[in-house]
Amino acid sequence: MVRFFLGIFAGLMLFSSSFAAPEQAAPSAISEYKLGPGDEIKILVVGSPDLSLDFILSDAGTISFPFLGEIYVKQMTASKLEAYLQGRLSQGYLVNPQVNVRIVKYRPFFVTGEVVRPGGYPYQPALTAYMAVTLAGGFTERAARRDLLVIHEDDPDHEPREIGLSDRVRPGDIIVVEESFF
């Protein structure tokens, strides 16, 4: 069964680059958000328009920044990336650089199983499992409405875990709505 979910996860990840949503979170939610492949970010270097660019994180979690080359940014927060870029750019490139990093689009989450429209959907900060199921068209008649599983993208074992309808969803999560037998 775990292999089945891993197969679904791998297949859905191939299609993930076309789904995203604009940033709409409160500042605290944004500051805790960790970047990952497929996220789109905007980097603004004040006074240096040639260094102010949009990036989509590669599958490896990197961006290619002028002068600095390939930078591994996966699992960094926007504020950590800002500090990193300020530090690197101040080493012989700019005097006291001011850098702002903004998340433009988040990577998607996925809903599969007994929902009307299984597939990938744009992540939105503060999204719950119930909201995710609603985005997927709601439960089918055969759905076990209280038996939801989640596979977290950042779980190295990709083990399905039980999730409640009010639990928060993270970018890259796979939510599985199981079939009811009664």
Image (cartoon, rainbow, N blue to C red):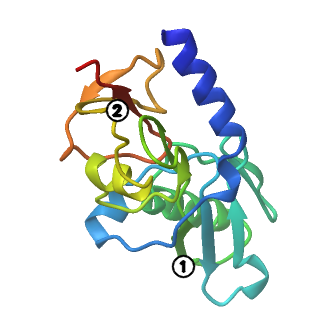
The residue positioned 52% from the left and 44% from the top of the image is 118
Q: Is residue 157 above or below residue 84?
A: above
What residue is disc 2 on? 142
In this rendered view, identify the residue nearer to me: 7 or 43.
7
Q: Is residue 78 left or right of residue 179?
A: right
SS label for mark 2? loop
Q: Is residue 75 above or below residue 80?
A: above
In this rendered view, identify the residue nearer to me: 170 or 57.
170
Q: Tell me where residue 77 appears, x and y as whole percent.
A: 44, 54
Q: Residues within 10 Å of mark 2 (few under 14, many from 20)?
A: some
What residue is disc 1 on? 98
Eye-nearest disc, 1 or 2: 2
User: Is the residue under label 2 in contact with that under label 1 (CB below 8 Å)?
Assistant: no
Q: How many marks?
A: 2
- The kind of residue tagged 1 is Gln
- The kind of residue tagged 2 is Arg
Q: Tell me where residue 182 appears, x and y as whole percent.
A: 22, 20
The residue positioned 38% from the left and 42% from the top of the image is 140
